[in-house]
């Protein structure tokens, strides 16, 4: 399979999309990014990697962090977390409040904001130094100690925290948040603010390949097969909010998006791939990134289906 040629074809064929969609501005710091950026990085299970475009440039991973925080939480706590978070697709936008009221403060899944806020609350209990320990997990998964929080993005989101604050307050009222609301928000916003390149993301997501056995040097971050299976299942059913069906239909891989314009997807037997293009569609997912991944699974004829 000539992945390099395929990636270059994808970059060329999707370049018509570079002006469609809108860069997220509800977190003002994210609105400063150049909308024309595009990168893609593919890490294969045989150790080879392929890339094109701005694949080494760091951007805000935003909701992609939700997969990594869930992975660490499941490693630490196992199945007990499912008393506080569901495993069903929500069919609603990522920051919706409506289901939480009638489902009594139990978020539908760990990838909508409410679910990730409960995960943050659990990690605050489990980790001695939550911000340092979570960052170390991400660095170990990626095999790159230079990864860091972007304090400007975290502060920008805290200034505009109102919807996430509403979600956290509502869940606290239902008894599903143990810590102080602003402490949970600060930790969650820091997770979302992590700056990583497509290369670093593709490498970090190898912990979900071959059920975690692909790179044994990542001992600290490695997942047992059952956890990798479950997280991949959640990515395919819930990774794109009310566009999860569309992603499974068009791309056919477990994946996760972020409002920074990044998308990571994994083919458990073949590769992990990260793509970045900041303009988003109306569901908050990268417009060009979605098309690029659709072309990848079409041209390679490799999907989980
Ligand atoms: O909480 C938020 O709204 C953002 N920090 C993350 C949202 C996000 O990335 C949704 N994904 N497409």
Image (tube, rainbow, N blue to C red):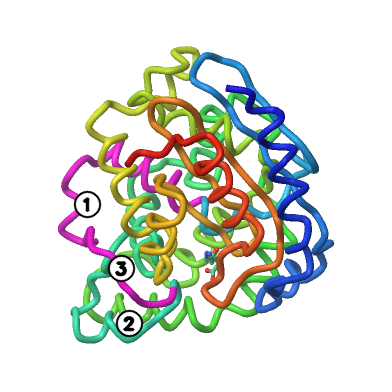
Q: CA distance from mark 3 to mark 1?
A: 13 Å
Q: Choose mark 3 or mark 1, whichever is in front.
A: 1
Q: Residue at x 33, y 26 (%)?
A: 211
Q: Position of residue 288 (x, y in %)?
A: 66, 59
Q: Which residue is mark 2?
A: 170
Q: Residue 43 appears in which quarter of the rendering?
A: top right
Q: Residue at x 63, y 71 (%)?
A: 157
Task: Please tell me how crowded label 1 is: few (under 14), some (14-19), or many (20+) other residues with Cα within 10 Å.
Answer: some
Quadrant containing ligand 1: bottom right
Left or right for 3, reference 232: right
Task: Please tell me how crowded label 3 is: few (under 14), some (14-19), or many (20+) other residues with Cα within 10 Å.
Answer: many
Say which quadrant the N terminus sits in. top right
Q: Which residue is mark 1?
A: 81
The dominant secondary structure in magenta is helix
Say which quadrant the C terminus sits in. top left
Q: Residue at x 45, y 26 (%)?
A: 270
Left or right for 240, reference 35: left
Quick check: 125 above or below 286? Answer: above
Q: Which residue is mark 3?
A: 177
Task: Please tell me how crowded label 2 is: few (under 14), some (14-19), or many (20+) other residues with Cα within 10 Å.
Answer: some
Tell me where the magenta segment starts and ends, as one range. 65-93
Helix, strand or loop for disc 2: helix
Which residue is more in the foreground, 258 or 218? Answer: 258
Q: Position of residue 255 (x, y in %)?
A: 45, 48
Q: Position of residue 224 (x, y in %)?
A: 28, 26
Which residue is more in the foreground, 281 or 155? Answer: 281
Q: Earlier in the sequence, mark 1 or mark 2?
A: 1
Q: Position of residue 256 (x, y in %)?
A: 47, 52
Q: CA distance from mark 1 to mark 2?
A: 19 Å
Helix, strand or loop for disc 3: loop
């Amino acid at each position: 399979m000539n992945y390099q040629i395929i990636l270059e074809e994808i970059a060329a064929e999707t370049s018509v999309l570079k002006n469609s969609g809108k860069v997220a501005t509800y977190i003002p710091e994210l609105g400063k990014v150049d909308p024309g950026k595009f990168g893609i990085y593919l890490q294969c299970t045989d150790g080879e990697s392929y890339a094109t475009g701005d694949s080494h440039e760091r951007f805000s991973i935003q909701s992609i962090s939700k997969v990594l925080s869930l992975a660490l939480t499941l490693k630490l706590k196992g199945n007990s977390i499912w008393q506080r978070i569901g495993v069903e697709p929500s069919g609603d936008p990522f920051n919706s409040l409506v289901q939480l009221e009638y489902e009594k403060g139990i978020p539908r899944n760990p990838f909508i904001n409410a679910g990730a806020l409960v995960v943050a609350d659990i990690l605050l209990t489990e980790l001695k130094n939550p911000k340092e320990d979570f960052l170390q997990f991400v660095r170990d998964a990626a095999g790159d100690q230079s990864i860091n929080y972007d304090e400007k993005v975290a502060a920008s989101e805290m200034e505009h925290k109102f919807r996430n604050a509403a979600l956290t307050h509502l869940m606290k009222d239902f008894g599903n948040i143990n810590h102080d609301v602003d402490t949970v928000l600060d930790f969650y916003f820091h997770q979302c603010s992590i700056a990583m390149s497509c290369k670093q993301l593709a490498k970090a997501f190898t912990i979900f390949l071959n059920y975690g056995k692909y790179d044994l040097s990542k001992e600290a971050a490695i997942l047992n097969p059952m956890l990798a299976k479950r997280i991949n299942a959640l990515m395919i059913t819930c990774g794109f909010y009310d566009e999860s069906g569309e992603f499974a239909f068009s791309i056919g891989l477990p994946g996760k998006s972020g409002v920074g314009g990044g998308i990571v997807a994994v083919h458990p037997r073949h590769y992990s791939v990260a793509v970045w293009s900041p303009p988003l569609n109306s569901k908050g997912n990268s417009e060009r990134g979605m098309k690029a991944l659709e072309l990848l699974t079409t041209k390679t004829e490799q999907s989980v289906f």
